[in-house]
Amino acid sequence: MIRIGIVGIGNVAAMFIQAIEYYKYSKESIGLIHEVIDGYRASDIKIVYAIDISKNKVGKDLSDAIFAKPNIVPKVIEVDRTGIVVRMGRVLDGVAEHMVNDFQPASLPEPTIDDIANELRNYNVDVLVNLLPVGSASASRFYAEAAARANIAFVNCIPEFIASDGDYCKLFEENNALVLGDDIKGQLGSTIVHRALTSLIAMRGGDVIETYQLNVGGNTDFKNMLEQKRLTSKKISKTMAVASTLPEPEKVISNIFAGPSGFLPFLGNTKISYIYIKARGFLGLPITMDLKLVVDDKAMASAVLMDVVRLAKALKNRGVKGCPSWTSAPYFKYPPKQAKSDEEALLDLYINLDRLGIDIEPKRLYLWNMLSQLRDK
């Protein structure tokens, strides 16, 4: 069993918690990236601790809180009462000024770092997942430090640079703790699709001249990102995720834009991405690509979380600490070290898991299967 704590019971948390229930009863593993990691299945994940700051969620059973306003995730499966009461968190910068009416912070005493660290120990939390709104810089670091003090794993799903910060890596290593991040990729979200296309162009001898990725959606995540000053790290994260696939990213980075571009309430949890690439191919002749991608924004993140929390537990079981980039690279937009392609990142993950004796199935990489066959001969 993997005991999970969640900070921020928003739309991603609502989808993730429902997904855990779904895979408990489903005979199929459809949609999972990996079915088994170190013997753990999706059904082995258990939420035991939850934090939020909204008066609509704090004090409620988690099964009710995931459907409380302003969440708009549809009910995919019936979630029985969990017995887990959502606890009051620390507000700090987790609520933008224009989001106060949406999030409606509760007027309750706020915990200290020591309070949170002690509760994480008392609830035997294995992995704490950060799902705070984009721009929650101080709040994310507050919970990261609490996780480090509690000697557990911290998964940073938002674009605040924690796993990619050397000082935080040192903090987690010194506390025999683990941090994975930063800024979770979607299963087939805009960033990973964009990276796949730019990687393909580079692999086939072309040059990217300019490219953009425009994203619009209708949930509170997109409304929160209307405040531009909360987007600095988000734009860096998404832009560098694309630029890092190119042979000389510094030469083209000024011609790359990737980031949230609009809030359309009627879209709900649907995210629409428009990806444009202008490239130069054989004989310098022009190539233009235009792609429209439509996904459920929160399902995309939840699919990746299914893998990441199981990996975090498996690594902690093996005594891995600090911020192993090879674990973060396949799953996050801004890991400590970027891979040139997601195939390279996945291969590196498989190699390192094999070294540690951690099995992961099925292997989603033809190259790995080919290498395994050659090794067995």
Image (cartoon, helix red, strand yellow):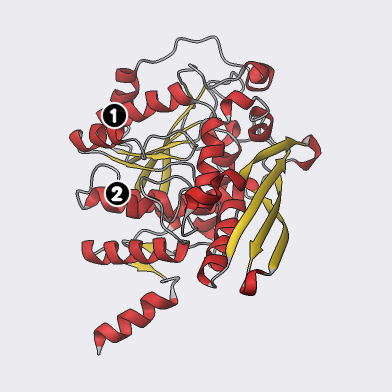
Label placed on residue 230: none
Q: Is residue 232 above or below residue 92?
A: below
x 65%, y 52%: residue: 211
The residue pinned by badge 2 equals: 324
The C terminus, quarter of image: bottom left
Q: Position of residue 275 (x, y in %)?
A: 69, 54
Examine the image and state in which quarter residue 214 appears: top right
Give the residue displayed 29% in from the left and 19% down from the top: 114
150 to the left or right of 365: left
Q: Residue furthest right?
A: 266
User: What residue is at 36 percent from the left and 49 percent from the top?
Assistant: 337
| Residue sitting at x 48%, y 16% | 92
Looking at the image, tell me whether mark 1 or mark 2 is earlier in sequence order.
1
Q: Amino acid at mark 2?
A: Pro
Q: Is residue 86 above or below residue 128?
A: above
Name which residue type carries label 1: Asn
The Cα–Cα distance between marks 1 and 2, rounded to whole angstroms, is 27 Å
Relative vertical location of residue 374 with respect to residue 50 in this rendering, above or below = below
Q: Which residue is mark 1?
A: 122
